[in-house]
Amino acid sequence: LRRTLFEIHKFELKEGIAIFGKYMNVTHYLQILRNSLSINETEWVQQFIEGYVPKLHPSYQKPIRALSTAYLYSKLKEHNKVLEILNKVFFKEIKDKILVKLLYLQTYFDLNETEAVLSQLDSTSHFMKNNILHFREDLAANHRRFLRVLKKLVTLKEKEQSHGIEEIEQYVIKHKTIVLREWLLEKISEMRKGAA
């Protein structure tokens, strides 16, 4: 499905039908970027960033270039570069800020920075509460599920335990729309292997 979507996106871009009006839609741009990274099309994504960030509205170009590059480095597991990029750019849109917070959480988790993850979990939870009117109810629920699952994974990781990992995995499998579901399942799998 993701591979098919990737080919559709490539066709849309080639034929010029991915852009309506003067500028490319940021949401559509990010959908293309994230889908392409999910199937490891990292070289293509580099070209996509260079070619299509300039087609976004000028006010979005700097933050979206930073966010795009951070996503790319995250996929390449160059975590320190992710942090370096995110620390340099100010994001003003609420929807961008939550994406940045999620990237911080993924990065700190992968770097085994437990205190930083817990601090960011708390910060993200407060951010969601303070900006609840900016999120659809179902989207807010899926973000909260992600935060709860990640907190449980951090606790298990810190205690070097695998007891309860199956229950967490079943929860993630059951909730198909949970935020960053594939990433969570990947981390659960890694923790299983580490405990084996």
Image (cartoon, rainbow, N blue to C red):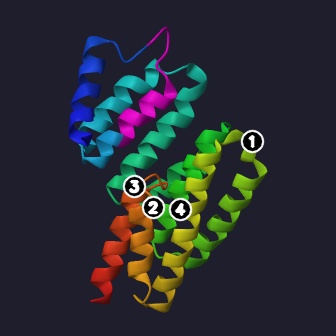
Question: What are the residue bounds of the magenta stretch?
Answer: 20-34
Q: Nearer the viewer, mark 2 or mark 4?
A: 4
Residue 80 has which mark? 2
Please give the name of the residue rendered at 39% of the width and 71% of the height, measured from the top-left corner: 170
Callout 2 touching callout 1 (CB < 8 Å): no
Image quadrant where one finds the N terminus: top left
Q: Amino acid at mark 4?
A: Phe
| Element type at mark 4 | helix
| Label 3 or label 4, whichever comes before in sequence order | 3
Number of on-image labels:
4
Residue 146 has which mark? 4
Q: Nearer the viewer, mark 3 or mark 2?
A: 3
**Residue 82 pos. (x, y %):** 46, 54
On the question of residue 164 being in view, the answer is yes
C-alpha gap between disc 2 and disc 4:
23 Å
C-alpha gap between disc 2 and disc 1:
33 Å
Q: Amino acid at mark 2?
A: Asn
Callout 2 touching callout 4 (CB < 8 Å): no
Rendering quarter of residue 45 = top left
Q: Residues within 10 Å of mark 2 (few under 14, many from 20)?
A: some
Q: Amino acid at mark 3?
A: Ser
| Label 2 or label 4, whichever comes before in sequence order | 2
Report which residue position mark 3 lands on: 74
C-alpha gap between disc 3 and disc 2:
9 Å
Q: Is residue 145 above or below residue 136?
A: below
| Element type at mark 1 | helix
Q: Residues within 10 Å of mark 4 (few under 14, many from 20)?
A: many
